[in-house]
Amino acid sequence: MTLKACTKCKRITEEERCPDCGGLTSTNWSGVLIIINPEKSRIAKELSINKPGEYALRVR
């Protein structure tokens, strides 16, 4: 069970491709951001996140 982050939208997943945008994933990521309610989150708006979930802060 290796967690990976999407190189496009930064969503954290276990899959080879992101289930949201279809982008490739990478095991080289750091930092975790958990968005529960993106409509009320200033951070989600700043990062253009519109779905709840776990996101990486940096993906390489």
Image: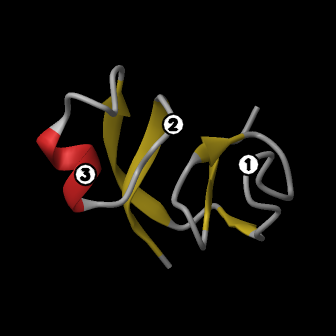
Instruction: State the CA–CA distance, disc 2 to disc 1.
Output: 9 Å
In the depicted view, which residue is nearer to us: 22 or 25? 22
Say if mark 2 contacts mark 1, CB within 8 Å.
yes
Reading the image, the residue beneath label 3 is 45
Q: Where does the image place residue 28, in percent across and percent down from the top left?
A: 54, 67
Front residue (pair 17, 22): 22
Closer to the observer: label 3 or label 1?
A: 3
Instruction: Name the residue at 73% across, 48% down.
Output: 20
Q: Amino acid at mark 1?
A: Asp
Q: Secondary structure at mark 2?
A: loop
- Up-down: is 56 above or below 3? below
Q: Amino acid at mark 2?
A: Lys
Label 2, residues with CA under 10 Å away: few <14, some 14-19, many ≥20: some
Q: Could you say whether the residue bearing mark 1 is in a helix, strand or loop? A: loop
Q: Three-letter amino acid code at disc 3? A: Lys
Q: Which residue is mark 2?
A: 51
Give percent across and percent down for residue 33.
Answer: 31, 40
> Within 10 angstroms of label 3, few (less than 14), some, or many (20 or more) residues?
few
Position of 24 with respect to 43 (left or right) is right
Q: Earlier in the sequence, mark 2 or mark 1?
A: 1
Q: Which residue is mark 1?
A: 20
**x, y percentage for residue 35?**
35, 30
48 relative to 44 in the view: left or right: right
What coloring was used for the rendering? secondary structure
Crowding near the residue tagged with mark 1, few <14, some 14–19, many ≥20 C-alpha atoms within 10 Å: few
